[in-house]
Amino acid sequence: MLTKLSQLLAQGRFVSPVPAVVVHPTTDIILQSCIQAHQHHIITPILVGPKHKIEKAATDANLDISGFMLVDAEHSHDAVEIAAKMVRE
């Protein structure tokens, strides 16, 4: 059983990252978390939300999300519906 974050990060080096749908990631802390989890091979983020807001948050925080899939959604309710559909498929 893992009891420390460092143990999870160490295991990430030996497994393939799993796709993770992240809904409405329009703040720098969420985007930074996605980047860090991706760098540690834990997830491959799929960002779902208003593209212009996500890109603005990334630009404002000087974060590179260019390698992530970005699915545009008009607003948060749409983002939830799109993400739920993606997970079901």
Image (cartoon, rainbow, N blue to C red):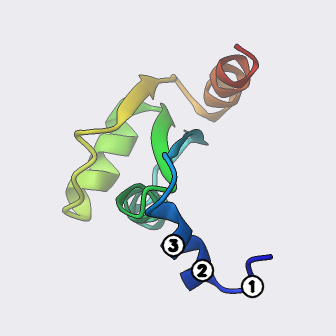
Q: Read off the residue under disc 1.
A: 3
At 26% across and 39% down in the image, what residue appears? Answer: 67
Q: Residues within 10 Å of mark 1 (few under 14, many from 20)?
A: few
Mark 2 and mark 1 residues within 8 Å of each other at the beta carbon: yes
Q: Position of residue 84 (x, y in %)?
A: 73, 25
How far, Cα to Cα, is label 2 from label 1?
A: 7 Å
Mark on residue 47? none
Nearer-the-camera pick, 83 or 13: 13
Q: Residue furthest right?
A: 1
Nearer-the-camera pick, 20 or 47: 20
Q: Is residue 86 left or right of residue 24?
A: right
Q: Position of residue 78 (x, y in %)?
A: 64, 23
Vertical arrangement, residue 6 with respect to residue 86, above or below: below
Mark 2 and mark 3 residues within 8 Å of each other at the beta carbon: yes
How far, Cα to Cα, is label 2 from label 3?
A: 5 Å
Q: Read off the residue under disc 3.
A: 9
Vertical arrangement, residue 23 with respect to residue 13, above or below: above
Q: Secondary structure at mark 1?
A: loop
Q: Residues within 10 Å of mark 3 (few under 14, many from 20)?
A: some
Q: Read off the residue under disc 2.
A: 7
Q: Secondary structure at mark 2?
A: helix
Q: Residues within 10 Å of mark 2 (few under 14, many from 20)?
A: few
Q: Amino acid at mark 1?
A: Thr
At 80% across and 76% down in the image, what residue appears? Answer: 1
How far, Cα to Cα, is label 1 from label 3?
A: 12 Å
Mark 1 or mark 3: whose residue is earlier in sequence = 1
Vertical arrangement, residue 47 with respect to residue 64, above or below: above
Q: Amino acid at mark 2?
A: Gln
At 46% across and 67% down in the image, what residue appears? Answer: 29
